[in-house]
Image (cartoon, helix red, strand yellow):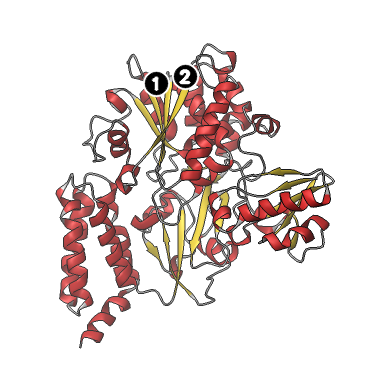
Amino acid sequence: MKVYVPADAAARALGSDDVAAAVQAEAARRGLDLTLVRNGSRGMVWLEPLVEVERDGMRLAYGPATAADVAAILDDTSAKALGPTEDLPWMKKQTRLTFARVGLIDPLDMAHYRAEGGLVGLERALALPPTEIVQSVIDSGLRGRGGAGFPTGIKWKTVAEAKADQKYIVCNADEGDSGTFADRMLMEGDPFHLIEGMIIAGIAVGATRGYVYIRSEYPDAIRVMRAAVEVGRKAGLLGPSVLGSAYAFDIEIRVGAGAYVCGEETSLLNSLEGKRGVVRAKPPLPALEGFLGKPTVVNNVISLATVPVIFEKGAAFYRDFGLGRSRGTIPLQIAGNVRHGGLFEVAFGMGLGEIVNDIGGGTASGRPVKAVQVGGPLGAYFPSSLFDTPTCYESFASAEGLIGHAGIVVFDDTADMLKQARFAMEFCAIESCGKCTPCRIGAVRGVETIDRIARGDTAAIPLLTDLCNTMKAGSLCALGGFTPYPVMSALTHFPDDFARAKEAAE
């Protein structure tokens, strides 16, 4: 018998370690020949800890499980039986490409990784000239999944054509947006997939060294990635000869200190060099003068982990998913006041209302949805009147929003949007690196101005609007430049919450 109990951070927070210990204890008591696999999460957080038992070649799901449920689960008499995992509605509605193996395999078992299609993409890339690797990524339409949505292949082409004695691949795993956890889930559940993508990037642009910059708040991801790098070296995946080829590539795991601004690529590079995490002026671009002044590819975890799929399935296969210039799939992270929170990978184009109401099941409180914030703390608040907006970069931009890292946070009708607007400005003021005046001073003035409005001074609303326009146009990076999105969307779509402050003051 084979039993799967997730070691994902979310599952562990909900008691999966106790369940795993109970499985081992019960197996020992019964004298069962049982193999326990600590896999990644399937992404259905409301069902965690989700235990899977393999019977007759089929994995059956039980959850949310507790240690007390283990005996009945092993007997297949548990009231928490959910049926075959792959037949659950949450799983059947997805298009799992980047997350195809997450939750399916033992994250640190290279043989298991290979058995489920791992390294096929790398092996096919190794047979191509570097220029063709870059062109395949361009042809796939893959864009950065970290927030900016810049075409991945174009960035690679710039680095590939740069002349330098050393180039680098830097993976941005500083996942700091509220309601986001895709990077963490992938690193904890399928680390070799990320490593494989980084190696392909290195071969494509002529880089021999890679760094994964992980936020300190992710101890499980740090542990798994470090272990995966060691396994990769022993297996000949990393080192002076990648899978016996003429290409060399190695990876080092670095840990950030928790600054939100280090999610911006130039701040990250400064931090990686041991400097204070502040934004650099551009030009020069990191693609030409990045880490230690050398040409550097800086990509998000999901961007890099998607690359092997392109070479395993083909650029045309990947490009066939999506809408407009938003190609492929996007791992949606559904969180906040929602009944069914978790990770849901789907092709670009699904409407926001379908995501929130059909996939997410509406609010956990049972009250009406008031707003949905997409794209982290700097994302716009969308009211229900915009729920027909397709999930793609262009549609969100036209609605004065951004997809960012695809975190979706749901609020019910008790939320005060004036307070949410204030939170955005306060967040910016706290997290600002201080490099530019519009962000450093503007966010502080923003908090003060919103406090004036909260005291009933609605005459300050034009001042807030003007301040937001200044921050948007004048900030050096997206922290100050995007803070106006949640503020102005709250003001535009929920004016009653601002007017109510004046009524309360009177």
Q: Position of residue 108 (x, y in %)?
A: 61, 35
Find residue 160 and report its image quarter.
Answer: top left
Which residue ends up furthest to the top in the rendered image? 246
Vertical placement of 152 versus 427: above or below? above
- Residue 442 badge: none
Q: Earlier in the sequence, mark 1 or mark 2?
A: 2
Q: Nearer the viewer, mark 1 or mark 2?
A: 1
Q: Position of residue 446 (x, y in %)?
A: 20, 63
Q: Marks 1/2: CA distance?
A: 8 Å
Residue under pointer 1: 160
SS at badge 1: helix
Query: What's under tag 1, amino acid-wise?
Result: Ala
Which residue ends up furthest to the front in the rendered image? 29
Left or right of 308: which side holds 370? left
Which residue ends up furthest to the right in the rendered image? 56
**Mark 1 packing: few (<14 Cα in 10 Å), some, or many (20+)?**
many
Q: Position of residue 247 (x, y in %)?
A: 50, 14
Which residue corresponds to the image point at 43% horizontal and 54% vertical from the top-left? 395
Q: Position of residue 294 (x, y in %)?
A: 30, 22
Q: Nearer the viewer, residue 431 or 346?
A: 431
Query: What's under tag 2, amino acid-wise?
Result: Thr
Q: Nearer the viewer, residue 366 or 402?
A: 366
Residue 92 seen in the current view: no
Query: Marks 2 and 1: in contact by CB < 8 Å?
Result: yes
Left or right of 399: which side holds 344? right
**Mark 2 packing: few (<14 Cα in 10 Å), some, or many (20+)?**
some
SS at badge 2: helix
Q: Quadrant of the N terminus?
A: top right
Left or right of 29: which side holds 481? left
Q: Quadrant of the C terminus?
A: bottom left
Which residue corresponds to the image point at 54% horizontal and 29% vertical from the top-left? 196
Residue under pointer 2: 131
